[in-house]
Amino acid sequence: MNANSISRRDLLQAASLLVIPSVAPLAVSAATRSPLKLSVFSKHLQFVKDEELATCASEIGVDGVDLTVRPGGHIEPANIAKDLPRLVEILHRKGLETPMVTTSIDAATPEAESILKTCAQLGIRYYRFGGLKYNDATPPQQQLAALKPRMRALAELNQKHGVCGIYHTHSGAGQLGASIWDLHILFEGLPTSAIGINYDIGHATIEGGLGGWMATTKLAGAGGMRGLAVKDFLWAKGAKGWDAKWVPLGEGMVKFPQFFAMLAKTDFHGPVQIHYEYPLGGADKGATQLTMDRANILGAMKNDVVKLRRWMAEAQLL
């Protein structure tokens, strides 16, 4: 930031003084809660298509697929009206749901109307967007104020089609949404049925360290959390210093049992997506050509699903 900007610490301190709605998250019993469903982010199965995609997703043990609807993804945005219904039907024949898609749209994106309309027709309730970043030339609070009309326009477009856009949270310098507080400010006054947070507990732990993720979980869980992404990491020191290193679930620093126990006390009922960002023969990066045996890749994916299901079952979320 320049000399006229406020620091990220200042932003967090200011945000902490905001009055958060006093309505606590609803406590939901296991008897009344609808079981949560697990989906695989299809970026990590970019090496297969159509029937093979359905077979691989079924093999690793998920309930559904979060489909990439973006350039180079499983569905090209320009072809969504033709290709998405066909792929959804293939997945459904295999017993797999399609609760959401991942996009790169905004209210002004030329394909936005077509994407949301097609999703609504197919009963796909959620789509993921995000990736906004702060610039160094303008104070963060001014940037958030400037973005509010843009988010309102997107929420109105979502309401028109009966879908919900969920902003994916990342970690790192300049990432809007990394702190969660800024999304609370950005989405204030907008209907949570139309726009909300796709809370990434891996990135939240990177940002929040030992306990900060607990505060952001509570904040996001107070109505704004509409989707959940799952991954794990360790801090590792390399040639350029300390950085986050993605690892299989349970081998890192994310406190999954504690997190899911907290989640069970909210009324969260959105899609849960499992991500595979650790080295996995190119599947981690969305490669179409692999450098590992496919069976080993799918085996690693299945191991993560088994662990994730165990933690969620212990919290009575499944």
Image (cartoon, helix red, strand yellow):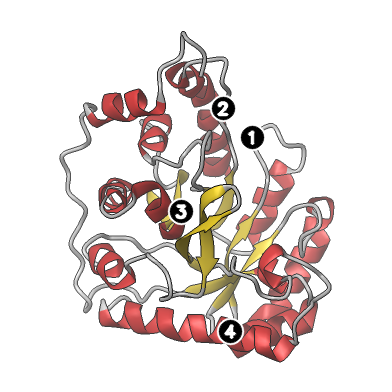
CB within 8 Å, label 3 to label 1: no
| Label 3: which secondary element | helix
Q: How far apart are labels 4 and 3 at the CA level?
A: 21 Å
Determine which residue is flagged by label 4: 300
Q: Residue 12: tell me if it is visible.
A: yes
- Residue located 31% across and 75% down the image: 317
Left or right: residue 110 compared with residue 238: right
Residue 107: give its label: 1
CB within 8 Å, label 1 to label 2: yes
Q: Position of residue 71 (x, y in %)?
A: 80, 52
Q: Amino acid at mark 4?
A: Ala
Of callouts 2 and 3, the N-terminal one: 2
- Residue located 32% across and 67% down the image: 255
- Mark count: 4
Q: Which numbered disc, 4 or 2, marks the residue closer to the eye?
A: 4
Determine which residue is flagged by label 3: 203
How would you rate the neighbour count of disc 4 (Cα within 10 Å): few for under 14, some for 14-19, many for 20 or more?
A: some
Task: State whether residue 272 is above or below residue 10.
Answer: below
Q: Quadrant of residue 31?
A: bottom left
